[in-house]
């Protein structure tokens, strides 16, 4: 099958969506890589540190499926932009709440935001590039992988030469920049479904054997990571 050349506007849309994926991995690991040292500096236990670091992932586990369902019903772009905006707002609130319980809440809310825009950005790539889905998803995941690599490196440098709070400012800046880029470059032609599928049926379909196999493949990779 002959591949259709990608137009400039499609390249910009793919780049913008891929940067959304980058923002998801970058912002999560930017803070996590130094969170233990920061909390340890004022006497937090290892258990508390583990809970705060894990709070972001807990939120993603709980909210990614609901956000996926909502995106099918109401559109992906709105949820993606809303998630980016939420991440920017939550991130700049860190100076007001530095206690471990508050840190858990902030990181949890960051996870909610990331769940919203990482889920919807992946789905939008699949929707917009049906003829070159493998290539598009490869680009998306390559940039997302770059976020996993760059986050801890930049987080360490920022914390060493400035302070830990600046990693939260960097999260807010990254989310805001990508939000503006997506507003300009990403368009969605969304038609609400005439008949909405019940949540129960959607969850039942998501437990098919082929889906469950993919779940375990992805989970094994993240567990090893």
Image (cartoon, rainbow, N blue to C red):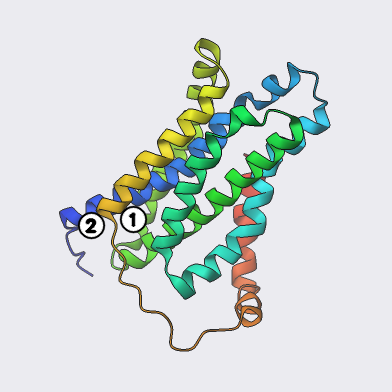
| Residue at 63 percent of width and 82 percent of height | 201
Residue closer to the observer: 91 or 75: 91
Q: Which residue is mark 2?
A: 10
Q: Secondary structure at mark 1?
A: helix
Q: As displayed, is residue 153 above or below residue 11?
A: above
Mark toward the start of the polypeptide (2 vs 1): 2
Q: Tag on residue 124? A: none
Q: Which residue is mark 1?
A: 136
Residue closer to the observer: 14 or 83: 83
Q: Quadrant of the N terminus?
A: bottom left
| Residue at 54 percent of width and 50 percent of height | 113
Whether residue 224 can be seen here: no
| Residue at 32 percent of width and 46 percent of height | 180
Give the farthest residue toward the bottom. 195
Residue closer to the observer: 208 or 24: 24
| Residue at 64 percent of width and 67 percent of height | 212
Q: Secondary structure at mark 2?
A: helix
Report x, y in % for residue 83.
Answer: 49, 52
Q: Are circles 2 and 1 on residues that touch, CB within 8 Å?
A: no
């Amino acid at each position: 099958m002959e591949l259709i050349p990608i137009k400039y506007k499609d390249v910009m849309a793919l780049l913008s969506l891929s940067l959304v994926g980058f923002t998801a991995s970058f912002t999560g690991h930017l803070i996590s890589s130094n969170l233990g040292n920061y909390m340890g500096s004022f006497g937090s236990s290892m258990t508390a540190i583990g809970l705060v670091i894990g709070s972001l992932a807990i939120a993603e586990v709980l909210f990614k499926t609901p956000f996926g369902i909502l995106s099918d019903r109401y559109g992906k772009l709105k949820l993606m932009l809303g998630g980016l905006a939420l991440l920017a707002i939550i991130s700049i609130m860190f100076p007001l709440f530095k206690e471990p319980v508050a840190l858990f809440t902030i990181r949890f809310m960051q996870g909610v935001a990331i769940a919203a825009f990482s889920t919807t950005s992946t789905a939008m790539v699949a929707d917009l590039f049906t003829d070159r889905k493998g290539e598009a998803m490869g680009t998306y995941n390559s940039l997302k992988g770059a976020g996993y690599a760059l986050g801890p490196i930049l987080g360490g440098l920022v914390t060493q030469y400035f302070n830990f709070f600046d990693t939260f400012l960097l999260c807010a800046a990254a989310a805001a920049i990508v939000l503006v880029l997506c507003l300009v470059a990403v368009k969605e032609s969304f038609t609400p479904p005439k008949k909405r599928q019940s949540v129960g049926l959607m969850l039942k379909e998501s437990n098919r054997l082929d889906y469950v196999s993919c779940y375990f493949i992805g989970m094994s990779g993240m567990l090893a990571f």
